[in-house]
Image (tube, rainbow, N blue to C red):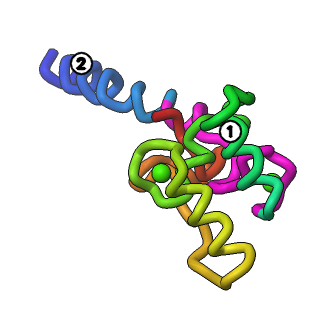
Amino acid sequence: MKKILLLSLVIVLIMPLESARADCQGICGDTNADGSVNLSDAIWLINYIFVGGPPPQPVLACGDANTDGVAAMQDVVWIINFVFVSGAQPGDCSPGNWESVGGDCCPF
Ligand SMILES: [Ca+2]
Ligand SMILES: [Ca+2]
């Protein structure tokens, strides 16, 4: 009986991790989801922030280039620095999640 209860507890604890894996998609900083990070991604993010354009694709978290948990103007600066000034690459938009399975961006 104890084994069944323990197994049930393990399944309940693992299930949220499985669903988080499935939700992670895209490449960090690739806000237009075309497979690379370049100036068009900074423009996409500017349109989202200031003009109400579509959010970063396929997951909003793909716009969080500086990994602070929000997609904002600082992320535009990060992308521009990466593209034009050899700044750090947007690497992991969702640190600690299962980015190696479906992508770097997991829903906030
Ligand atoms: Ca792109
Ligand atoms: Ca950010």
Amino acid type, mark 1: Pro
Identity of the residue furthest to the front in this view = 50
Q: Residue at x 66, y 56 (%)?
A: 29
Q: Single out the mark in the foreground, 2 or 1.
A: 1
19 sits left or right of 2 in the view: right
Q: Residue 56 has which mark? A: 1
Q: Residues within 10 Å of mark 1 (few under 14, many from 20)?
A: many
- Secondary structure of the residue carrying tag 2 is helix
Examine the residues drawn in magenta and state their main secondary structure: loop
Q: Residues within 10 Å of mark 2 (few under 14, many from 20)?
A: few
Q: Position of residue 16 (x, y in %)?
A: 40, 27
Q: Position of residue 72 (x, y in %)?
A: 52, 46
21 sits left or right of 13 in the view: right
Q: Which of the marked residues, 2 or 1, is nearer the chain's N terminus?
A: 2
7 in relation to 105, above or below: above
59 in relation to 97, above or below: above
Q: Which residue is mark 2?
A: 4
107 in relation to 1, above or below: below
Q: State the extent of the magenta-drawn residues as a range.
A: 20-37
Query: Rounded to the nearest whole Å, what is the CA distance between mark 2 and mark 1?
Result: 43 Å
